[in-house]
Structure formats: structure tokens, C-alpha cells
Image: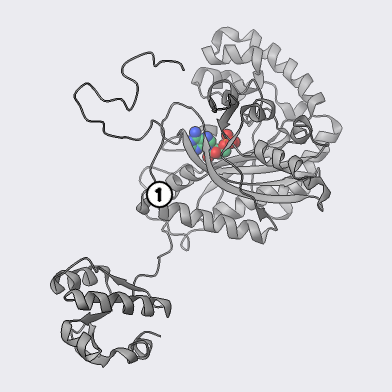
Amino acid sequence: MSKRKRGRPRGRPKKGKVYTPHLLRGMKDILPEEQKYFDFIESKAENLARSFGFEKISLPILEEAELFKKGVGLTTDIVQKEMFIFEDLAGDKICLRPEATASICRAYIEHGMSNLTQPVKLFYSGPMFRYERPQAGRQRQFHQFGLEILGSDKPVADAQIILFARDFLQSLGLKFTIQINSLGCVDCRKIYRKKIFDFFKSKKTFLCKDCRKRLKRNPLRILDCKETNCQKIVVQAPQIVDFLCEDCKEHFTRVLEFLDEVGVIYNLNSRIVRGLDYYNRTVFEIWPAAVPKQTSEVLPSEEKQGEQTTETSQSEEPSSQSALGGGGRYDHLIKSLGGQQTAACGVAFGLERIVEEIKKQQVKLPKIKGPQIFIAQIGDLARQNALRLFENIRQEGFRIVENLNKDSLRAQLEIANKLGVKWCLILGQQEVLNKTIIIRDMTSGSQELVDQEKIIKELRKRLK
Ligand code: AMP
């Protein structure tokens, strides 16, 4: 095992110091306050995906490292420097998945899904891992929601995926733009690659260090470089759409016609090339709309949702680096992994980026229904009785809460008040012995004593 170059290995305490555990770099705990956002996004995505006819697939987080080397591509950033690879106890090279499309294709081949009615429409959700330099919008563990249409080469499939992306982000109340391009097929890309290689070679001295390396390995990636100097050169570069063969041109035109048909607004953007080798023909990204620094609160109901602006930013300029999601067509991936020739396309959204955007655009989450009833108790006997009543009332479908750890009634009533609960049930020793319970109206402070066996009826009278 290789040693860390500098300092003490992580997790090993200084001499004489007690070990205190901490998060690994680039990893994040999602605490309940934050989890609400993820739940909101995922439930919207799942419901929408099902309504579009997609079915859920769950895949392992660990895969053979070779899957991504073959699938995502040897020259990509992901495979070159971002994979969490290690040997397992049997000496096999395995990795934490950096994305899910290659895994879905593996599953498609392994489970003979080509025998099912085509296309097969699947969606997934879960953590992905990339050993990147952690920064805003970039973590080493992040979460993606994605969908794939496997077994269709028709432009309508590309359009359906993009339509889903539009509807999904719109349903969250976000403002965004859809950037779309076509990378053509192997044949048109070969010609284009040569064209931009020659073009960038003639400008080599103005390119950043990374782009000079990209020139040999993958000149297309220069097109989405963020460096200002490279961007100035990129605007003069030849555009791939001018080099598409007749079939690819026809495919792209049909995709755009389908999008027009359903009113999806898009920007044609020749700089969208995506970072994964498996794409061909349609590629797209969804960028957050530029949000001016001083915005008033925007509620989904007040503004036209999902308005797809092209306004110039008064804050930071959206780009591939801040993309909420991206995808495209990958017609040769399944074959390159050993399956039959199967055309496919898909999209993946970054959940952390969407959460950040929801906050930035000040979209309000729907209110979760608060508790209706608090049950308070005084003394051990009452606590025992309260636990049973809590369970009975909860099973009847009421939203009841408690803090059975507390002893003082005052402390419990304070909690009930804080939670904004209208009805409080109070049990003391006397009530337990008489099989009664007090119902307190927390607004007026009035109290009523009722038989425990009538409690459900009494609550229903007040709450339903
Ligand atoms: P990709 O698989 O690279 O096409 O990524 C799809 C989406 O996942 C991106 O548009 C981002 O929203 C998100 N994403 C990719 N890498 C990261 C990362 N390191 N941290 C957070 N989100 C990411």
C-alpha cells in the first residue's frame, strides 16, 4: 500500500492524543435539515419518471474498475485521475462507481434485457464517487438521479429525455437553460477532430497548460475549457454542426423539431462536448439561469416556472462547471461492453447542485404537515400508559408526537407549544388509575377529562 507523501496518515492520532474521527475530504453528511431538500427532489423525480413510463433499477456502488475504463473512456478526466480504485481481498481491481450509465449497460447485457420489449426505460438514484478537488458544486461523493432509454436510435427518444429534464426542473420551480449540441457519429467526428486539431495547434501558444495536453489526447475537450484565454480562442473555432454527415444532421434536426413540438426552449451551443467518451450525436446540459445578486423572493406560483432565460449574469456566469445535469446519446456503449449493437440515450442530474440552486433561487419547499397532538405524562406509571396510547393514536393515522424522556409537565408543554400543536393529552397517576386522560386545548388553555377508551372518538371529533 502506498504511503501518504506528507504528514501523518489520516485517522492516526498524534502521539499521546486521542483519536477523534472526522469526515473524509470531499464527503458530506446530509443532516435532516438538508435531507428535506433531497427527499423533495427525489420524490418529484421518481413520480415524474414513472409517469413517463420509466422503471426503477438499483445497482451496486462497487463495480469492476475495467467497466469504466472501457465504458467512460481511457482519455477522460474521470478515468485518468478521478476514480476511487482499490484491490479487494481477492486482489481484484474494483472501484466506487463514478457514474451509473456504464453500470446500467452492464446490467442490460448481463440480464439479457435485449429480449424485453424495446426500448427499455430505466431510472436510478444514488451516490457516485469522483476523486476531484473539492470545491463549490464539486464533491468526492455526490448523488445523481438519472434515466436511460436503451434500445432506441430514434430522435424522439433524445427529445423525451430532454422533455423530462425540462418538466422535472420546472416542477421544482427552478429557472434554467437547456444547452444542446450534436457530436455527430464516428465519421463526422473524425473530420471535425482533424479540423479543430489543426485550428488549436495553430493557437497552441495561447492555450492553457491543460488544453495543450488535451490537444493530443482529446481536442474536443478544449471547447469547454473555463480559462478566459482559451475561451477567447474557442469562439473562433470551427463548429461541429457544420461538419455533420447527412444522417447525423437529419437526426439532430428531428430532435429539435420534437422539442419545438412540445415547446421546450433550448440554446444551440457548439461548446457542449461532455466529459465522457461514450457520447455520440445529441449531447446537452442544463445550466442554472443567471440569478442577479439581489433577488426578491421567488415563489413557484408567482413566477412563470422553468422560464429558460439567456440573460447575462450579474453574478457568476453559468457554464458546464455549474451544470445541474447533462446527458446525451451513446449508441455504441453497450456494444463496446460486449453486448449487441444497441442505441441508447440518457441524462443524469446532480442532486447537490440542484439543492444549492433551490436555495440560491429561493424556491420554497412545500410545507410538511406538522404534528396535531402532543402526549405528555407525569410519573413512570403514566409514561408506560402514554407509550401505549401514543402507539394506538399513531396507528389510527393521527400525527402525534411526544417527549417521553422528560419528567416535568412544564417542559413537555413548552415543547408542545414550540411545535405549534393544537391539542395536548395529559396523563398523571390519577388519570392512569381512573383510565381517563386530559385533553388540553393549547390555544385557549381549556381542559376536558375523558375516558381513555373514548380518546380516538374525541380526537376525531376535534381533528377530522
Ligand atoms: P456527468 O456524469 O459528469 O455528466 O455529471 C452529471 C451531473 O452530475 C453534473 O451536471 C453535475 O450536476 C453532477 N456532478 C458531476 N460531478 C460532480 C461532483 N464532483 N460533485 C457534485 N456534482 C457533480
- Residue 140 is situated, as x and y percent measured from the top left of the image, at 46, 33
Q: Residues within 10 Å of mark 1 (few under 14, many from 20)?
A: few
Q: Nearer the viewer, residue 109 or 71?
A: 109
Q: Which residue is mark 1?
A: 359
Q: Quadrant of residue 438?
A: bottom left
- Residue 396 is situated, as x and y percent measured from the top left of the image, at 42, 80
Q: Nearer the viewer, residue 333 or 229?
A: 333
Q: Is residue 415 above or below residue 52?
A: below
Which coloring applies here? one colour
Q: Residue at x 60, y 20 (%)?
A: 222
Q: Amino acid at mark 1?
A: Lys
Q: Nearer the viewer, residue 128 or 369?
A: 128
The residue at the far front in this view is 90
Q: Is residue 126 above or below residue 429?
A: above
Q: Residue at x 68, y 35 (%)?
A: 181
Q: Residue at x 65, y 18 (%)?
A: 219
- Residue 309 is situated, as x and y percent measured from the top left of the image, at 54, 46
Q: Residue at x 56, y 30 (%)?
A: 95
Position of residue 394 in the picture relative to residue 378 (left or right): right
Position of residue 305 in the picture relative to residue 359 (left or right): right
Residue 442 can be seen in this image:
no
Q: Secondary structure at mark 1?
A: helix
Q: Nearer the viewer, residue 241 or 20?
A: 20
